[in-house]
């Protein structure tokens, strides 16, 4: 996550201290757990926190991008006689939305591979999951 913040120094200023504090609090809670089930649950909570932080970063980056506008078609000067011309409008440029997915959630459980067919089956399953998440004008970030 720090690598992502390093790419955007102005966003890093906003979030780095808060994110660090949230993970420190989670670590302190982990150090005080009384049973293994709580410790295992902390792994999932940590993963969810990581995804939430990435989503906050992406929302802020998107918020800071200039709005998408199309150029208006040129109007002829008033009183001038012009032949009708086809005006090519420029297509708007859309900023792609980033969808953050957890590797832990996408690759749940233990996998055992004995043959190439096992690997192919796993990759096909993963491909299907990713394709289900992929939408038009969307970037998938696997964290």
Image (cartoon, grey):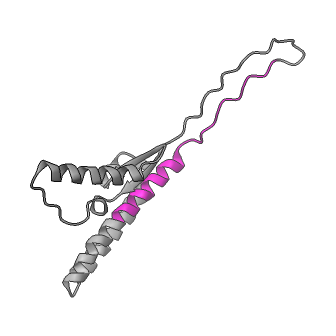
Residue 18 is situated, as x and y percent measured from the top left of the image, at: 39, 65
Q: Quadrant of residue 42?
A: bottom left
Q: Which is nearer the eye, 56 or 45?
A: 45
Question: Residue 126: image x %, image y %?
Answer: 29, 53
Residue 84 shown left or right of residue 95 in the figure? right
Q: Could you tell me residue 11's position as x and y percent?
A: 43, 52
Identified at 34% across, 63% down, the residue is: 50
Q: Residue at x 17, y 61 (%)?
A: 111
Is 89 magenta? The answer is no
State which quarter of the image contains the C terminus.
bottom left
Q: Camera-side residue: 35 or 22? A: 35
Answer whether residue 5 is visible to the viewer in this image.
no
Task: Name the side, left or right, on which 78 lies relative to 116.
Answer: right
The total number of labels drawn is: 0
Q: Residue at x 37, y 59 (%)?
A: 16
| Residue 45, above or below 112 | below
Asked if residue 75 lies in the magenta stretch, the reply is yes
- Residue lying at 16% horizontally and 53% vertically, measured from the top left: 118
Instruction: Give the x, y percent position of residue 114.
Output: 9, 55
Observer able to see residue 107? yes
Q: Of residues 66 and 126, which is closer to you in this image?
A: 126
Give the answer, above or below, for where 102 lies relative to 25: above
């Amino acid at each position: 996550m720090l690598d992502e913040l390093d790419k955007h120094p102005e966003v890093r200023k906003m979030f780095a201290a808060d994110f660090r504090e949230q993970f420190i609090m989670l670590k302190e809670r982990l150090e005080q757990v009384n049973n293994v089930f709580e410790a295992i649950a902390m792994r999932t909570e940590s993963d969810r926190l990581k995804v939430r932080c990435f989503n906050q970063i992406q929302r802020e980056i998107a918020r800071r991008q200039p709005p998408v506008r199309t150029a208006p078609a040129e109007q002829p000067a008033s009183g001038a006689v012009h032949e009708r011309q086809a005006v090519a409008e420029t297509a708007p440029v859309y900023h792609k939305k980033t969808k953050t997915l957890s590797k832990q959630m996408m690759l749940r459980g233990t996998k055992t591979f004995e043959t190439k067919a096992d690997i192919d089956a796993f990759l096909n399953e993963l491909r299907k999951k990713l394709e289900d998440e992929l939408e038009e004008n969307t970037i998938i970030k696997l964290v």
